[in-house]
């Protein structure tokens, strides 16, 4: 089923949209199956779990960290992580920079922007994003590169609200892109809302359950 699910999604999205297969909680065998079907980008939300999978699986996989970061564990993934989606603190950016430097790498990061109305969602406010991107303290960090934004919409069926949340982030992205040519990725959309997110300008979707089936936790 994993192969068929992947094919169905790939066929339904534009070519310029990148699919991150969210494999959190799923076993190695499932990821291998998706890999055999051609998928190369996988997303995990726990560092230790991602490290274990990285070690067990083919080395041409690109691993994306999509979860809320535990700063003290960044060091375990600094040598291989391809993109970190959920950066929502300056301190975390500095921590990633420090670990990346040890491996002589530049780690690509997305700033998480709070677009949902729920209190529980992490992320910077729109005002904070603007000030971070122009702050000398951040531009001085040579071992990280801010390549775009990540947003998570409210958990709701209200299409109008989802549209507004996605559109607001797209607007911010377009505005700041004119001043900052490194901004290329807009990560928004999950199993339930990726079509809508793409119609509102997403360039990268994070899809788990529609590929691997539902999860019992997380
Ligand atoms: C789990 C997760 C996803 C994937 O969710 P699905 O609804 O299973 O597609 C996407 N993004 C983040 C940040 C997640 O934690």
Image (cartoon, rainbow, N blue to C red):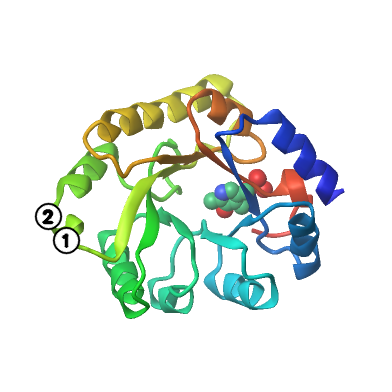
Locate residue 103, reporting x and y percent: 37, 78
Locate residue 12, reporting x and y percent: 71, 29
* Residue 42 left/right relative to 180: right
Numbered label attached to residue 65? none
> Ligand 1 closer than 8 Å to the CB at disc 2?
no
Numbered label attached to residue 140? 1
Residue 56 placement: quadrant: bottom right
Locate residue 57, reporting x and y percent: 69, 72
* Residue 99 vertical position relative to residue 211 in the rendered view, above or below: below
Dot 1: what SS?
loop
Q: Residue at x 41, y 36 (%)?
A: 115
* Nearer the observer, 89 or 118: 89
Quarter of the image where the C terminus is located? bottom right
* Residue 215 vertical position relative to residue 77 in the rendered view, above or below: above
* Residue 126 left/right relative to 210: left
* Nearer the observer, 15 or 172: 15
Crowd class of label 2 (few under 14; some 14 to 19; many from 20; radius 10 Å): few
Asked if the residue at tag 1 contacts the one at tag 2, i.e. Cβ–Cβ closer than 8 Å, the answer is yes
How far is disc 2 from disc 1 in space, using C-alphas? 6 Å
User: Pointer 2: what residue?
Assistant: 136
* Residue 10 left/right relative to 135: right
Dot 2: what SS?
helix
* Nearer the observer, 96 or 164: 96
Residue lying farthest to the top in this orientation: 160
* Residue 166 vertical position relative to residue 41 in the rendered view, above or below: above
Residue lying farthest to the right in this orientation: 1
Residue 75 placement: quadrant: bottom left
């Amino acid at each position: 089923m994993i192969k068929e699910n992947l094919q169905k999604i790939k066929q339904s999205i534009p070519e310029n949209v990148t699919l991150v297969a969210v494999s959190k909680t799923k076993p190695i065998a499932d990821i291998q199956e998706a890999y055999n079907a051609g998928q190369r980008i996988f997303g995990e939300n726990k560092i230790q779990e991602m490290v274990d999978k990285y070690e067990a699986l083919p080395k041409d996989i690109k691993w994306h960290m999509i979860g809320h970061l535990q700063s003290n564990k960044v060091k375990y993934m600094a040598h291989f992580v391809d993109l970190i989606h959920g950066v929502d603190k300056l301190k975390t950016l500095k921590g990633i920079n420090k670990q990346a430097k040890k491996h002589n790498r530049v780690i690509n990061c997305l700033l998480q922007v709070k677009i949902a109305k729920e209190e529980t969602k992490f992320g910077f406010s729109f005002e904070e994003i603007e000030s971070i991107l122009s702050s000398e303290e951040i531009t001085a960090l040579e071992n990280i590169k801010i390549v775009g934004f990540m947003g998570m919409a409210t958990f709701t069926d209200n299409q109008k609200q989802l549209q507004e949340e996605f559109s607001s982030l797209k607007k911010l992205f377009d505005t700041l892109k004119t001043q900052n040519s490194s901004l290329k990725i807009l990560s928004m959309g999950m199993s339930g809302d990726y079509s809508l997110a793409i119609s509102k300008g997403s360039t990268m979707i994070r899809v788990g359950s529609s590929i691997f089936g539902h999860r019992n936790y997380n």
